[in-house]
Amino acid sequence: MMDVGRHPNIKLLTYAEVEDISGYVGNFKIRIRKKARYVEETQCTSCGDCVDVCPVVIPDEYQVGLGSRKAIFLSFPQAVPSAYIVNADECLGQNPIACGKCIEACEKECIDFTMKDEIIEVEVGVVIIATGMDIYDPTPLDEYGYSSYPNVLTSLEFERLICSSGPLEGHLGRPGDLAFPKRIGFIQCVGSRTQDPERGNPYCSNFCCMNTIKTTQYLHDAYPDVESTVFYTDLRAFGKGFEELLMRSRASGVKYIRGLPGEVYEDPETGDLHLMVENTTSNRLESHIFDMLVLAVGAVPRKETETVRQMVSLSKSPSGFLREAHPKLRPVDTPTKGVFIAGSAESPKDVRGCVTQASAAASRASILLSKDKFSVDAITAVVEEDLCTNCGVCANVCPFSAITWSKGQPAEVITAACTGCGTCAAECKFNAIKMRHFSDQAIFAQIDAMLEDNPSETIPTFACNWCSYAGADTAGVGRMAYPPHANIIRTMCSGRVSPDFVWYAFRKGAPVVLVSGCHYVDCHYIDANRSTTRRLDGLWDGMDKLGLDPGRLQLEWCSAAEGPRWQHIMEQAEEKRLKVTAGEISETSQLLKEKKVPSPRNPRPKDENQLSDFECLVCGEKWEGNYSSNQERSCPACRSNSVRWIRKR
Ligand code: FES
């Protein structure tokens, strides 16, 4: 921290909060609120005179509530800058000044209650998010008695308790009566590796086993009289030197018992903690007595990370941690260009993992910063200004906020921020957005080609590049046989699949159409596949309205690793194809031709604010609406987006 504070190229802003991040790679703008600390940080020598006279006593967050602090305080002993902060909400000296004792005590006159929060705006090229993690709160796990007994602590609380800068200044004592604990039990996997959401999280928190092993070793070295017993489901000591540490811990007399306690209760007289456990190695029910119990709690994502995540349009994994661009090949990149992640914001890690990842993120960021120009993939969206109706729909659906739009102005794509998912192009009803590569013409041409001969034997299959297409590949590489009638059209994301592609395929005689993409949380374009679901809902409704069997349009999610699932999806689609009759196919084709579905896209009207007549090309519904309102341009009867503007009134 000291090194960071002194580094000429690092500007350290403490006691500050990021309020907004806008812009894109190379051009991020960050608004930061630097909170008033009411102490001149350059003058404060942290002598502590102000602390001595402050009458307000508050539980100390740094000591996880095991110690106390004053309303004027140092966040933690090694804080940089080493200057006090007054918490305005806790201080008695605010508005009007009722106390002011710290002002009188400070000889250097560093305390200034007129200070105000400062808004700082910085422009940066890249952003690295390293917001860390929180620990699991074991209160819901009644059987361990965490909320009932003072001598049941979390591993973090125990860490503070034995720390030389902790509430007992490094002396070991149990919080209930400060007696020296001779028997200490450690319970592993608290709030981790459970499928019951009421009892924690399904993932392993990575660092808890080694933290406990390290603590037992410390206790053995510092307090040889202490008996440590560890209860575990299995021990994960897989890092460099970790197994050796575990063996040292065992050799030093620490007992390791495989099995998690079912119940803990306290003897009110002595404060002893009684614990029942099934030892799954000996298959015996055992009872143990401890002076203190330490719960090795797992990790959870920080609440505040969610705010930052939304600011820079990142996705998160099912566990709530930030999602990397690729778990193996781009582990510190994110789908948003120029944004990197480091440390436990991505997943729970130990110190070594955090340092490694932070170094990697800094290196990746430096690669970008060292260049004058940034090259982007050619697959980006382009707005045709003449066709743009300024409706703003494209900007709303863009998962990366890469499209800017204001009333009266055509939409504009920020090429550097565009990732080429194609959701905007699929959403635009006026053909005003073109994709470089994966263009409409190319996709229509592929549909034409695959349905030219024997269309009834072909299943046009739209597969996203990252998961479904790769899943099909996995099935192929694994020699998994499946019916050969699916012809794949690759798109970068399932969000690129426009309803027109589907209608066109049916019109050309497809018996079944399949749209496939990544599982919801896996979409490589954050949540672009939610647009896919919305569009397919509209298509199913439209098919229903037209008297077509909605089952002929299938939507499936498949990951790159799910070869067997792809095989199953193919078998299902084939099963459906065999049920669709030749008559059904030709009737569908005829009907869509008559109804002109899909139709050539509407030209832009002259005056967009006028009321207009609309006609649904799917169900024939006619209505009056406002041309510039996107909502009024969807069919009120069947929710189809295949709508025709008739005339300006
Ligand atoms: Fe696969 Fe979006 S990338 S659905």
Image: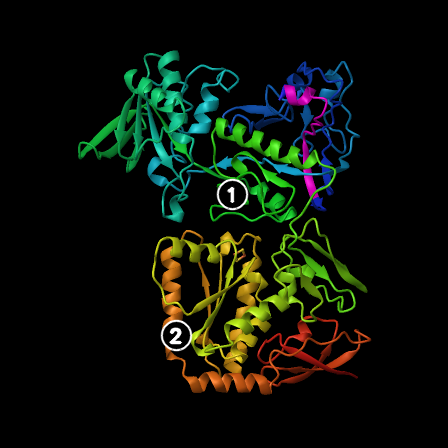
Residue 276 visible here: yes
Residue 349, compared with residue 447, is above or below; it is above
Q: Quadrant of residue 86?
A: top right
How many neighbours does mark 1 have within 10 angstroms: few (below 14), some (14-19), or many (20 or more)? many
Spot occupied by residue 556 in the image (x, y as percentages of width and height) = 45, 63
Q: Give the range drawn in magenta.
A: 3-20
Q: Could you tell me residue 60's position as x and y percent? A: 56, 27
Quadrant, the C terminus: bottom right
**Quadrant (top left, top right, bottom left, bottom right) of the N terminus:** top right
In terms of secondary structure, where does tag 2 sit?
helix
Is 202 situated left or right of 521 in this image? left
Instruction: Give the residue at mark 1.
Output: 321
Q: Earlier in the sequence, mark 2 or mark 1?
A: 1
Please name the amino acid that badge 1 sits on: Phe
Q: Per the image, is 270 magenta?
A: no
Ligand 1 closer than 8 Å to label 2 CB: no
Q: Which residue is drawn at 65% across and 23% down?
A: 4
Q: Nearer the viewer, residue 539 or 426?
A: 426
Residue 637's place in the image compared with 380, above or below, is: below
Disc 2 from disc 1: Cα separation: 39 Å
Q: Contact, CB < 8 Å: mark 2 with mark 1?
A: no
Tell me if residue 103 comes above or below residue 436 in the rendering.
above
Question: Residue 219 is drawn in which quadrant?
Answer: top left
Whether residue 180 is visible here, answered yes or no, is no
Provide the residue designation for mark 2. 576
Instruction: Return the mark for residue 72.
Output: none
Queried on whether the Cβ of the residue with tag 1 lies below 8 angstroms from ligand 1, the answer reads no
Nearer to us in this view, 140 or 9 = 9
Where residue 199 appears, as percent x and y from the top left, is 38, 44
In the image, 602: left or right of 301? right
Q: Residue at x 62, y 85 (%)?
A: 621
